[in-house]
Amino acid sequence: MIPYLARVLVKAVVTLFAIMTVTFIATRFSGNPIDTFLGEGLTTEGRQALIDYFQLDQSLWQQYLAFLRGALSGEFGLSFVDRRPVTEVVAERLWPSAQLLLASIGLTIAISLPLGVLAAVYRKSWIGSAVMVVAFAGYAVPAFVLAIGMILIFSYWLDWLPVVGSSTALHFIMPTIAMSGVLVAALTRFTRNAMLDVLGQDFIRTARAKGLGEMRVVLRHGLGNAAITVISVIGLQIAGLAAAGSVVIESIFSWPGIGQLLVNAAIIRDYPVLQFGVIAVAFAVVAINALTDIAYALADPRIRLGQN
Amino acid sequence: MTPLLSPPLLAVRDLHVTFGQTEAVRGLSFNLHHGETLALVGESGSGKSATALSILRLIEREGGRIAHGSIQLAGKHPSDITTLPAAALRALRGDRIAMIFQEPMTSLNPVMTIGAQLCETLALHRNLRGRPAREAARAALERVKIPEPDRLDQYPHELSGGLRQRVMIAMALICEPEILIADEPTTALDVTTQTEILLLIAGLQEETGMAVLFITHDLGVVSEIADRVVVMKDGTKVEEGRTAEIFSTPMAAYTQELVAATPRLGEGAPPPRTEVEPVLRVEGLTTVFGGAGLFSKGKTTAAVRNVSLTLGRGETLGLVGESGCGKSTLARSIMRLVEPIAGQVELLGCRIDGLSPNALKPHRAKMQMVFQDPYASLNPMMAIRNLVTEPAFLHGMVSRRHRRVMAASLLEKVGLPAEAVDRFPHQFSGGQRQRICIARALSVSPQIIVADEAVSALDVSNARRVTDLMARLQQQEGVAFLFISHDIAVVERVSHRIAVMYQGEIVETGPTAEVLRNPQHAYTKRLLSAVPRFDRLSLSAQQTDHSELRTVDSMPA
C-alpha cells in the first residue's frame, strides 16, 4: 500500500506543477496586462513604473521563476478590484462551494446506489424499468431548467424556500437538488451496469451455493465488487463538478462560491484572481483524483496488494 | 463396500429443465448413494451442468426452470428439493449439499479475504463467529492440504489456480455436507494439479463418507475418480453403469463414440519425418515482462528463456507444459506479437527478429495463428465472408469483389458449407468456430500455423474433428504446425516431434514416441505420470458382474 500511496502522491505533485506552468503561460499569452487592466490615461513614467514594479521587462523565464517563487511562498498577488491578496479572496469563496459540492455528492450517493442496485436486481420487472425511466429523464433535464423550475414552484408560487444566499439549511435544498439531478441519473446507470456485470460473475453463484440470503449476496458480494467501478465514476463526477459544474447553479442562486467568483473575475478582467482561482480549482481536482485513487485501492485488494 | 444396496441419498426422477423454449434436460433419472462417486459425463450442451445446478435449485438464477420431476433428498429431514420454500432451500445449500465449480480463478470473491469467505458459511450454518470461526476455517484449510494454511488474511488473487480450487473445496466441505457436487472442478487446471485435486477429493470422501456427484466431459478423469457413470447426450441419459464396464464394453452407440474420440496416451504418434527442410528456426529466444513502467523498479521476469527450436516443412511440433510455463509467450514471441529481448527467428531463411513493423508485414502472411477461445477470437460484428478473408485482403491477395468466392472455398476446405459465408459467428458452435479460425489462417496460404491450445476449449469429439482436419490440411498443403497444448494425449496424436517446456525453458525435445516412452527430464516424467489413463481400468472390468445394474437407453432421435 505504501508504494502505491507514494506513486499517487508523486503523480499529483507532477500534475499540479504542470497545471501551474500551463496557467502561467496561458495568462502571459492572453495579452499585455498593462494595456488590459489600466488602459487609457497612463503617463509614460507611470507606465514604466508599473512595468518595473511587476518586472514585466524581464525575460519570460525570469518571470516564470518569480511566479513559482511566489506560488511556493503562497503569494499570488493582489486582486485588482479588492486590493486584497487573491489567496484571501478565493479562500473565503472555497468553503461555500465545498459545502454545496459535499451536499450534492452526499445526496447523489444516497439516491443513486440504492436505485442502481434495485434496477439491477429487478432488471426484468417493472421496478427496474421505472428506475431507468426516471434516470433517463433526469439525464435529459439540464441543471438550470431544474433550478428555474424549482424556483418557480417552491419560491415564487408556494413561497416555501429561499432563493438567494447560503445562510440556512433551507438555502441548500434547491441548489443541492439542482446540482445532483444529472449526477443521480448518471450514477444510477453506472451502478446498475456495474451491478449487472458483477451479479453475472461466478463468485455470486458460489455465494448462493453457500446458502447466503439474497440481501447478503447482492450487498456484500455484489456491491462490494461493483463499488470498484462506482468509486471511479464518483471520483470523476466530483472532479468534474469541482472544475466547472457549479458555475451555473451558483450564478442562479447567487451562491457566494468560487464558480461565481471566477465568472466575475473573467468578466472584469481581474487576472490575479482568475489565475489563482484556476490554480485553486485545479488543486481541488487533483486532490479529489488522488483521494479517488486511494479509495479505489481500499476497495480493491488487487490494486492495494498488487504493487509490492 | 456395497453402497448400492442402501436406499439412495439423492434420487432424481424424470427431471426436465428448460431455458425459455429449449429443454436442456429431458426426463433424467439417477440415484446417488452414500459414499459413492457418480460421474455425470457428456459434451458441452448435454445438460449435465443444468442438472447439477438444478439439484441446488441455482438453475433459477441462471435463467432456467425445473419444469417437471422430483429431486428427493433422504436422510434426517427427507424432502423434495423441487418444492422446497426459499428459506429451507438456503438452509440446505452449503450445509447438506455443497458445490464446487469449474473456474477457480473467478469462483471466489476477489475483494474478500479467504478467511472472510470461509467464516461466512460457518456463521450462516453453524452460528460460529470470531475466534472459533477462524479456528475452524484454519482447520478446513489444513484439511485440503494447503501449504502454510495461515492464508486466512490473503485475497484470492494471491493464490494460484490449484490453491484457489483447494480453498473452494475447503469452503464447500466446511460444514461437512452429505453431498458434494463438483462441476468440472479440474477442467481449468493443469494435469499435475488436476491429479492432486482428484486425489484430495477422493481422500476427503473416504474420510467423511460423503457422496460426490462429479460432472465432467473428460473420460480420463472419470476413470480416475468415479464408481459409477451416467452418460448424457442432449439432455437425456444414454447409458448408466459401473465405470470399468462403461469403458470396457460401452453399450450405447454414443458412449462408444465418446470412448473412441477420447485421446489416450500411448495410442501412437505419427512417425518423425526425416530430412525435411526447416521453415522456422528459433535460436536463443528470450522474452521478459515487466520493468517498463515509469515508476516501477525495473523488476523483470523472464517468461521465455533461451529457447531454440526448428520446425520442418509439413511437420507438427507439439509444445507441452503447464499453464504459466511460457508456451503462449513463446508462440507470441515467434509471431512477433510480443517483442523478444534476445535471440533469432528465421522464417523460410529470412531473419524476422528486429524487422520494423512495415518490413515484417509481408512475412506475417507466411505464419498464422489459431487461438484457444473460438468464442473470443472471432469479431461478432463481422460476417464470416469478411472474417475468413481478412488476412488475405490485408495482404492484398484478394480483391474486394472476390472475397466471397474465396470465403466459400476456404469454408469448404475446413468442412463447412459454402452457404455459411453470409452468417455471423454466433450462429456457429465452438467446434465450427474453430474451423472458421483455421479457414481464416489458411486464407493467406501460410507455411506455418501456430495453434495455441486450439482444441483445449472443445469437447472430445469436436477436438478430434479439428485435429483430423489439421492432419488433412498438413497432407494436402504441407503446412507445418506448432501445436501448443497442455493435453499430452492430444499432442501425442498429432505431433511428429515434441518439445516439453518448463519454467520458460525447453527441457526436453525429440520424436514424440521416444520422448513419451522414455522421458529423460524429471519434469517430463512427472507430467506423464499425472495424465489420467483409463486403459488401466478396463483390464479389471469383468472381475465383478454388475450387469443387472446397467441400463442403456436408446439414442434420442
Image (spheres, coloured by chain):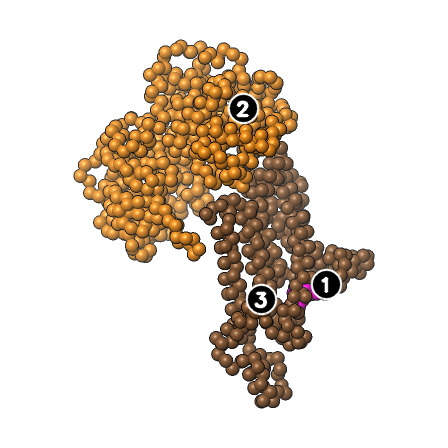
Chain colours: A brown, B orange
Residue picked out by circle 3: A279
Along the viewing direction, whichever of B515 and B155 lies nearer the viewer: B155
Residue B367 visible in rendering:
no
Residue B302's x, y, as percent?
Answer: 34, 46
Instruction: Work out how far the residue at label 3 is from the one at label 1, CA to CA, in angstroms.
Output: 24 Å
Residue B18's x, y, as percent?
Answer: 55, 28
Instruction: Work out how far the residue at label 3 is from the one at label 2, CA to CA, in angstroms.
Output: 62 Å
Identify the residue at the far left of this view.
B275
Q: Is residue B87 above or below residue B503?
A: above
* Residue under the image location 72 percent in, 65 percent down: A254
Q: Quadrant of residue B223?
A: top left
Indicate the chain on which mark 1 is placed: A
Residue picked out by circle 2: B176
Query: From the image, which quarter does the C terminus of chain B lie in?
Result: top left
* Residue under the image location 36 percent in, 12 percent down: B542
Q: Are marks 2 and 1 on the same chain?
A: no
Q: Dot 2, how many residues are within 10 Å of its Cα: few (below 14), some (14-19), or many (20+)? A: some
The magenta span reads A254-263
Dot 3: element: helix
Residue B295's x, y, as percent?
Answer: 44, 55
Q: Quadrant of residue B310?
A: top left
Residue A253, which numbered label?
A: 1
